[in-house]
Amino acid sequence: MANGSFKKQGSAKGGANPSARLLVAGWIGSMVLVALLTVMLTYEFSDEDTGAGDAGKLEAGQVAQSAQGDDGVVESSPDTQIEDSGADDQVAANAPDEPEQPAEPQFMPNLKFAGRAGIVQLAASSLPPSDTVAEWCRTLAERVNGVASSDCMSGAFADSGHKSVNGRPLIVRQIEPTSRPGAGRVLLIAATHGDELSSVGTVFSWMNMIDENGTGYQWRVAPVMNPDGLFHEPPTRVNANGVDLNRNLPTAGWAKESRDYWRRVGFEKRRFPGESAGSEPENQWLAAQIKEFKPNVIISMHAPYGVLDYDGDFPAPQKMGSLNLHRLGVYPGSLGNFASRMQDIPVITVELDDADEPPSDGEIEQMFTDLNGWLDRYFRSVRQASADGGNAASDAG
């Protein structure tokens, strides 16, 4: 190549260089491939981000899983919020204009939504008992045969906020009818006299039967009206002030009649009616319960006379289990006098055979069956009387 000319590489024979048309086609293809890869990667990362955001919030119809720490323990906020705080911030930033309406979770039917999405509130019957109720249950189970601490703590008892003379809590349980509306309201109380422990065990057995079989009534149950007497060592009939609670309610003519009665019983300390009507905090609470709850029937558990007493205008129940009707009359300051004579509320007083040991399981069941039979007839008569505009039929007995 002395003349300075050179032979161009890629001659027709070599074929190493593509034509212009092939170069353009290759360039377009590469651009399309890059675009496709970009779209796929963008979609994938966007989907992962969305999943991370949704994992911390409560969707309609489901409860999302709480955030987990590195040790695998589920973390939740103090106000029982189910989502974690970081996810909540992200949800708030991307939330739609219309608020979400969460649906009831199907796998946790005892949870109810309250407030904004993600906040739940346990049903009352599923909540653990308060420290006050738990301590009451433990001490009651130790003292009374027929009371199991586990049944007591799972029974949705509540501290009424009222206390006995010595500051012991007055505990109550509300039981709603299985089907609405209920036929009526029933107030059930026991241990008005603290040394009648069998009354408490029997009431707990009845509550277990209601839990198992349901009920057509609304019940309010006060298993221990006189905790100071019941937890005294030994248990006593009277409260911590030495007052017989079933002679202290504010009945008509109490000031004179209670003193005449006490004189007739020889000024027996067990039956001291107190210095003034309704002076005792336990009876003040009972009177307030009757006023607020407005029971149609009151059942008061006692022992040990082994009879069935009744105060009311409707025909009396003739028997409950092995207990036969035997009217004992009313006394100044007694519940039968206060509720039946003064407020026209029928009062069934159950006097068990033994003050310490509750009846057999079969006897308790038969008593409760007979009681419910009378309640059914009674409320049916009340409904019929209301419909007729006259007096109730006589089939309530």
Image (cartoon, rainbow, N blue to C red):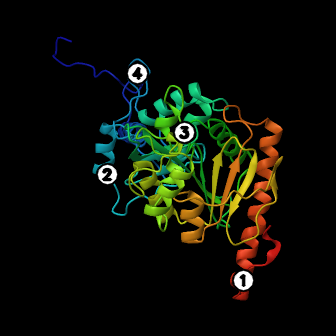
Residue under numbered circle 3? 237
Q: In this view, does 256 lie to the left or right of 61?
A: left
Disc number for residue 172: none
* Number of the front mark, 1 or 3: 3
- The three-letter code of the residue at mark 4 reads Gly
- The three-letter code of the residue at mark 2 reads Asn
Question: Farthest bottom residue?
Answer: 389
Q: Which of 134 and 365 is in front in this view?
A: 365
Q: Distance between the residues labelled 1 and 4?
A: 122 Å
Is 10 rendered above or below residue 256? above
Q: Distance between the residues labelled 1 and 3?
A: 39 Å
- The three-letter code of the residue at mark 1 reads Asn
Residue under numbered circle 4? 14
Question: Is there a contact, CB below 8 Å, between mark 2 and mark 1?
Answer: no
Of mark 1 and mark 3, the one earlier in the sequence is 3
Question: Is there a contact, CB below 8 Å, between mark 3 and mark 4?
Answer: no
Q: Is residue 357 left or right of residue 6?
A: right
Disc number for residue 391: 1
Q: In this view, does 120 lie to the left or right of 392?
A: left
